Image: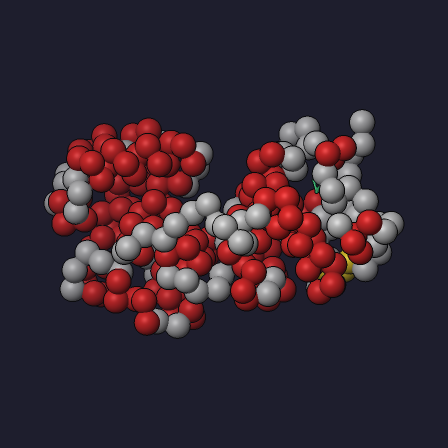
């Protein structure tokens, strides 16, 4: 764990985030624990539209229900042309397990229509040559798509540098004292985007989520088993 083994470091400023050295050290520790910079446990879809719809399904539910809804939808209606032609109620039935199915079915149909109008078909493959700023702008123009969803598609399906901040990543950044305790995920994403090195964004995002699910849990974090406890200002030792 090298430099992190020293005492808790006072070099954190919630206005500017962690120092570069501290951030890199923490990312290194998380990589040694979870290894997803070297071997990410997610793979890109052939068409970024699949990744976008999967991320829409993930809103307000867990990964398991998201995946069950996506798999059922794709097995019943393998093409986005078929999905776009479905009545909203039928689409909602297919994705019911992901929760708020009526809202999500309406959003999905609206998104598919915007994509068809913009690209001439139900596909986002045409986006593969776009720059990050243009992708983000287009994504944010879609109904129900916010910065986190846009960043997920960018980093996972388009290979662009982005650092999505979900509830886990937000909790970790707050507990580490890198951002204000009341900072929203959107503002944390804005701040951390500029701090996490470009080539490490995807793996860092995945490692932090793994760490938060296993150790830095929302309730009863296992600080006694956390290799960051020496430098974490939120450590709770039982
Ligand atoms: S010491 Fe505790 S609060 Fe801090 S990162 Fe580790 S598990 Fe989370």
For the C terminus, which image quadrant? top right
Residue 87 location, quadrant: top left
Q: Where is residue 89 in the image (x, y as percent from the top left)?
A: 19, 33
Which residue appears at 32% of the width and 67% of the height?
128
Q: Is residue 181 visible?
A: no
Residue 151 in view, yes or no = yes
Q: Which colour scheme is used?
A: secondary structure
User: How many dots with numbers?
Assistant: 0
Q: Indicate left or right for 1 with 213 as reference.
A: right
Residue drawn 47% across and 53% down?
148
| Residue 124 percent coordinates (x, y) | 26, 60
Instruction: Give residue 121's position: percent from left, percent from top.
Output: 16, 60
User: Vertically, is 55 above or below 196?
Assistant: above
Asked if residue 117 lies left or right of residue 193, the reply is left
- Residue in front for this viewpoint, 194 or 14: 194
Q: Farthest right residue?
A: 7
At a point 19% along the width and 56% down the height, the residue shown is 122
Q: Quadrant of ligand 1?
A: top right
As drawn, is 38 to the left or to the right of 153? Answer: right
Residue 222 quadrant? top right
Q: In this view, does 76 lie above or below 129?
A: above
Q: Is residue 191 above or below residue 167?
A: below
Point 42% across, 69% down: residue: 132
Residue 139: image location, x then y, percent? 36, 60
Q: In this view, does 100 lie above or below 147?
A: above
């Amino acid at each position: 764990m090298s430099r992190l083994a020293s005492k808790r470091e006072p070099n954190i400023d919630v206005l500017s985030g962690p120092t570069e050295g501290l951030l890199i050290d923490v990312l290194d520790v998380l990589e040694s624990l979870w290894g997803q910079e070297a071997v990410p446990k997610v793979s890109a879809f052939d068409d970024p539209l699949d990744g976008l719809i999967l991320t829409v399904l993930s809103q307000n539910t867990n990964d398991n229900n998201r995946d069950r809804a996506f798999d059922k939808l794709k097995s019943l209606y393998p093409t986005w042309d078929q999905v776009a032609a479905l009545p909203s109620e039928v689409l909602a039935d297919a994705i019911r397990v992901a929760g708020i199915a009526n809202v999500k079915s309406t959003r999905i149909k609206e998104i598919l229509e915007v994509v068809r109008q913009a690209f001439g078909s139900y596909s986002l493959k045409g986006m593969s040559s776009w720059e990050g700023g243009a992708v983000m702008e287009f994504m944010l123009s879609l109904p129900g798509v916010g910065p986190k969803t846009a960043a997920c598609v960018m980093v996972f399906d388009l290979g662009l540098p982005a650092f999505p901040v979900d509830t886990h990543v937000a909790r970790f950044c707050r507990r580490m004292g890198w951002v204000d305790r009341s900072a929203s995920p959107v503002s944390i994403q804005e701040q951390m985007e500029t701090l996490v090195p470009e080539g490490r964004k995807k793996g860092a995002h995945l490692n932090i989520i793994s760490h938060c699910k296993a150790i830095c849990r929302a309730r009863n974090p296992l600080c006694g088993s956390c290799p960051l406890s020496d430098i974490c200002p939120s450590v709770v030792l039982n």
